[in-house]
Image (cartoon, helix red, strand yellow):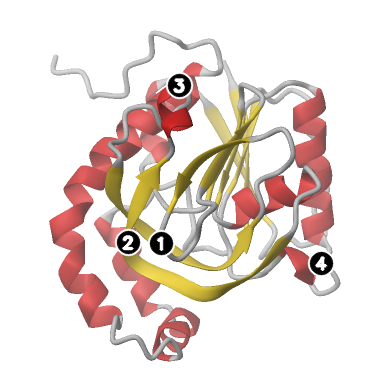
């Protein structure tokens, strides 16, 4: 049985649509919630891969959140062990920082549904190779990163040019949220800190707007999620894994 270590930062940011795919592939999953246990010192011994989820803190706030240093050490350890690693939002920023790239505040936050434009390199053997040239994806971030030296740039948006990268064959950073479903989005929109963050945007794209747009785009996002995460699972030696539910 393959074992996966998942680094979590807040209760409402979870594996989402990735979870059932991992369960069907036979993974045993262990969450380490640094929001509840910031002093935790997990080890990758016995694990076959690492997923680092999103969170409201910034990579450069390690003086306030020392566990970010712990997480970057785990990411480095995973790379040295040649394990598959997936970073989502904050997780992608932590991978970038571990690889020596700068992480900093974006000029403008992306919260809600935005167009994602894939680079030609995304079609060349990456887990994003089934995305179209432009796809509507869900975003919730205020920071961005430089693409690390030696990494391959995979996607961009108008407001944030660095949306995804691959390092080596098994390390991926995704700034956007493929893992969300409609229930997760609605849960995020109810978190007081999140609502306050949206209110400060002064863009007119408030919770009601995001709520109204979600049914229009969520179906296609689920397709992209299944396709992309199934290929990530394939990095564990499950090349023939098909994330679709059995009809029998």
> Mark 1 — residue?
158
Viewer-nearest of labels 2 and 4? 2
Q: CA distance from mark 3 to mark 1?
A: 22 Å
Find numbered disc 2 in the image and state the secondary structure of the residue it sits on.
strand
Q: Earlier in the sequence, mark 3 or mark 1?
A: 3
Q: CA distance from mark 2 to mark 3?
A: 24 Å
- How far across and how far down the image is residue 161, in percent? 51, 56
**In the displayed structure, does residue 131 sit left or right of residue 198?**
left
> Mark 2 — residue?
114
Quadrant, the N terminus: top right
Mark 2 touches mark 1? (CB < 8 Å): yes
Q: How many marks?
A: 4
Mark 2 touches mark 3? (CB < 8 Å): no
Residue drawn at x 78%, y 46% as measured from the top left = 98
Residue drawn at x 54%, y 10% as measured from the top left = 237
Q: CA distance from mark 4 to mark 1?
A: 29 Å
Q: Residue 124 — which label?
A: 3
Q: Is residue 107 above or below residue 40?
A: below
Q: CA distance from mark 3 to mark 4?
A: 35 Å
Q: CA distance from mark 2 to mark 1?
A: 9 Å
Q: Earlier in the sequence, mark 3 or mark 4?
A: 4
Instruction: Indicate the quadrant where residue 45 lies.
Output: top right
- How far across and how far down the image is residue 174, in percent? 52, 46
- How far across and how far down the image is residue 59, in percent? 72, 63
**In the displayed structure, does residue 73 sit left or right of residue 237?**
right
Mark 2 touches mark 4? (CB < 8 Å): no
> Mark 4 — residue?
62
Quadrant, the C terminus: top left
Find numbered disc 1 in the image and state the secondary structure of the residue it sits on.
loop
């Amino acid at each position: 049985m393959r074992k996966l270590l998942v680094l979590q930062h807040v209760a409402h940011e979870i594996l989402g649509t990735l979870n059932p795919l991992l369960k069907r592939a036979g993974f045993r999953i262990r969450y380490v919630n640094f929001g509840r246990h910031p002093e935790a010192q997990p080890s990758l011994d016995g694990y076959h891969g690492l997923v680092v989820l999103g969170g409201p803190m910034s990579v450069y706030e390690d003086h306030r959140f020392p566990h970010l240093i712990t997480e970057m050490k785990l990411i480095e350890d995973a790379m040295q062990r040649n394990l598959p690693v997936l970073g989502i939002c904050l997780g992608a920023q932590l991978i970038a920082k571990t690889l020596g790239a700068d992480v900093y505040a974006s000029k403008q936050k992306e919260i809600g549904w935005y167009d994602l434009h894939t680079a030609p390199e995304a079609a060349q053997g990456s887990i994003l190779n089934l995305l179209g040239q432009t796809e509507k994806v869900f975003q919730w971030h205020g920071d961005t990163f430089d693409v690390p030296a030696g990494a391959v740039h995979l996607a961009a948006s108008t407001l944030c040019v660095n949306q995804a990268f691959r390092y080596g064959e098994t390390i991926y950073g995704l700034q956007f949220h493929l893992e969300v479903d409609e229930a997760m989005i609605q849960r995020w929109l109810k978190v007081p800190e999140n609502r306050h963050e949206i209110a400060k945007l002064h863009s007119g794209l408030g919770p009601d707007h995001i709520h109204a747009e979600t049914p229009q785009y969520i179906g296609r996002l689920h397709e992209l999620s299944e396709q992309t995460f199934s290929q990530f699972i394939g990095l564990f030696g499950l090349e023939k894994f098909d994330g679709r539910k059995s009809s029998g």
